[in-house]
Image (tube, coloured by chain):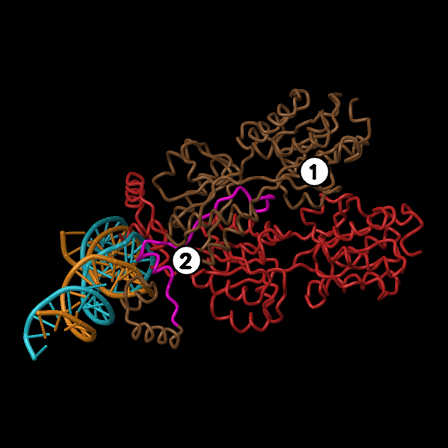
Chain colours: A red, B brown, C cyan, D orange
Amino acid sequence: MATVSRVINGSSRVSEKTREKVLSAMRTLNYRPNSIAQSLASNRSNSVGILVPQVHGPVFASMLSEAEEELRNAGKFTIFATGLSDEIKEQEAIRFLISRNCDALIMHVDALTDEFIKEQMDDALPFLIMNRVVPGLEDKCISLDNERGGFEATRTLLEMGHRRIAYISGPLAWVDASARLEGHRRALAAYGQDFDDRLLVESNFKEFGGSEAMSKLLRRGRSFSAVVCANDEMAAGAMDAIRARGLSIPEDVSIVGFDNAPLSRYLYPKLTTVNYPIAEMGRMAARWVLRNVYKDSEAEIRHVFRPTLVPRGSAITAEGSRDDAPGK
Amino acid sequence: MATVSRVINGSSRVSEKTREKVLSAMRTLNYRPNSIAQSLASNRSNSVGILVPQVHGPVFASMLSEAEEELRNAGKFTIFATGLSDEIKEQEAIRFLISRNCDALIMHVDALTDEFIKEQMDDALPFLIMNRVVPGLEDKCISLDNERGGFEATRTLLEMGHRRIAYISGPLAWVDASARLEGHRRALAAYGQDFDDRLLVESNFKEFGGSEAMSKLLRRGRSFSAVVCANDEMAAGAMDAIRARGLSIPEDVSIVGFDNAPLSRYLYPKLTTVNYPIAEMGRMAARWVLRNVYKDSEAEIRHVFRPTLVPRGSAITAEGSRDDAPGK
DNA sequence: CAGTAAGATGTAACCGCTTTCATTTCGATG
DNA sequence: CATCGAAATGAAAGCGGTTACATCTTACTG
């Protein structure tokens, strides 16, 4: 028995002869190790928990599937749960995953506080935070350089000649939303433009919120020839609102989104947006676990990813635009 | 020990007094049962495997998350894997899930043959097939009435006065694709219309395929005022191709999709389509497992779900349409 | 109050593996 | 060929529960 265990795990030296004998016996008996028993004895469950707000969000699905594939290739099981961006549910989900003795946790949590993460999680098991930076735990975080993304979005419009650029933000209490806005402001400053409060609306990262925010902007009567939306869903809503006003995209208003979610390719015109390399980030998360928990990989870990602009049809040069931008 | 086990599992009678004592001891010791050890001893892993082609597909994500939520509420773990619609990979994924001693398997498989399922799976563990009917295993299948969906799509257009209706199909080797087409033909027949081969193109359920198929239809020069696409992705592609030809939707061509995938709401105009109640179906799958494997639910199981039309902006009455349908 | 059966609790084997430690085998050396 | 150390193998104790079975309590009964 001990020898069989050794050849299965390659844990210790076994002579070539007996290794062959064991393997062939395994074959003829069609033996499959009981992975639960392995887990119990080795105190390794070989499974990693992934917690996401939802599965169908624009971003989570590909993160999940990329991570799962990478883990499965290494023989690890992926157990997932959804936290629904609710603090209580996220805590419950974490407990649930821990209760299955996951070897590690990859989590994208919106509602949990930094304090909870720092204080409650630390001893429990190795974990990784996605798309968020918790101060003091930078080496356990994989995130996007949101500030740079915001900068790129606005810079692109500025280079196209736009000067009056509106901005529809996500909830500014969320760090990613405020970082994106920060980037926007930096771009304006870099091009010598003043930031105008009346061209900013804070919304909720949802489609309908984007639509409402755009209506509000249009009602304010402050002219603008382009708008940056802090995510693609709000951009979709904003596009509806622009059209409802009888304006057209991109002739009257250029629009840039953020995320490069699948939906952005389906909008009409196709949305110019900032790519969120979420698939790579999911893969990287899996590698982090493989490396740091299972000592199974030598992969270099990158913690901060760089967003890049994806030019499509929804933004054109200011000269190409009509002269009657909203509110003029 | 035995008594503790009994109060945890409620498996046998325990006096109220000792039950209380055990529970309070559990509380003060902050005791959490080791779920792996439970699994080994009870020969129940309390986890169910879900196999989907991909996570980000239009349909799988919500199926996954609904099923997971239902299972988690019952204290069961969800392990998932992706099969990528590849026969070998699907088999590997199944083996992988079985190797973790899943108590049941919920699988959406495209590439696996009926024979494999009937012969290889039967003894291994309880399983459920999603979105597909395997002859002889109807009670282990949860599926959509695709024929009816195809019928509804075409009937809607017929009632709007359309007579020449093109059809872009999925791969006819797949049963769901051919059932949808069958429904289309039945609707035509019910309204006394002949089926015209030249208005049918078989494609691949993908966006680009839809776009190519539409180009082909337009090149054929056979007139039509409306088109049914066997899924929303192809509809998205078709819409691009229609516009590339300088035609507009729905004025020149009405279009109806199938699936009611998230993307359908983002298209412009928003896509009239047939709803695929995949979230409910995922939930139902979880209930099936809870009931049949864990004896934990009394839920009535529905095996065949009914698609319904979701009217949106991409299809209008024939009278509202321009008179110059393509090819006229 | 002894007798009894149902109900509550305790005992210990077992689930299928890993791992430590002891034992055996083997090859090289003097 | 005896000796020795390293390498290979074997034995057995867990891992943390479940559960069949044995034993002990209880509450009734006659």
Residue B213 % position (x, y): 68, 28
Are dots 2 and 1 on a single chain?
A: no
Q: Nearer the viewer, mark 2 or mark 1?
A: 1
Q: Which residue is mark 1?
A: B236
Residue A256 % position (x, y): 78, 52
Q: Residue at x 38, y 71 (%)?
A: B31
Q: Amino acid at mark 2?
A: Ser
Q: Chain of mark 1?
A: B
Q: Which residue is mark 2?
A: A45
Crowding at mark 2 (Cα within 10 Å: few <14, some 14-19, many 20+): many
Q: Secondary structure at mark 1?
A: helix
Compared with residue A324, is residue A180 higher up or lower down, i.e. above or below?
below
Q: Secondary structure at mark 2?
A: loop
Q: Residue at x 36, y 76 (%)?
A: B24
Q: Do tag 2 and tag 1 residues touch (Cβ < 8 Å)?
A: no
Q: Chain of mark 2?
A: A
Q: Quadrant of residue B214?
A: top right
Residue B127 % position (x, y): 41, 43
Q: Give the alpha-carbon distance from disc 2 to disc 1, as whole Å.
A: 43 Å
Q: Amino acid at mark 1?
A: Ala
As for residue B23 lying within the magenta part, the answer is: no
Task: Point out the stretch of residues depicted in magenta.
Answer: B31-59
As for residue B45 lying within the magenta part, the answer is: yes
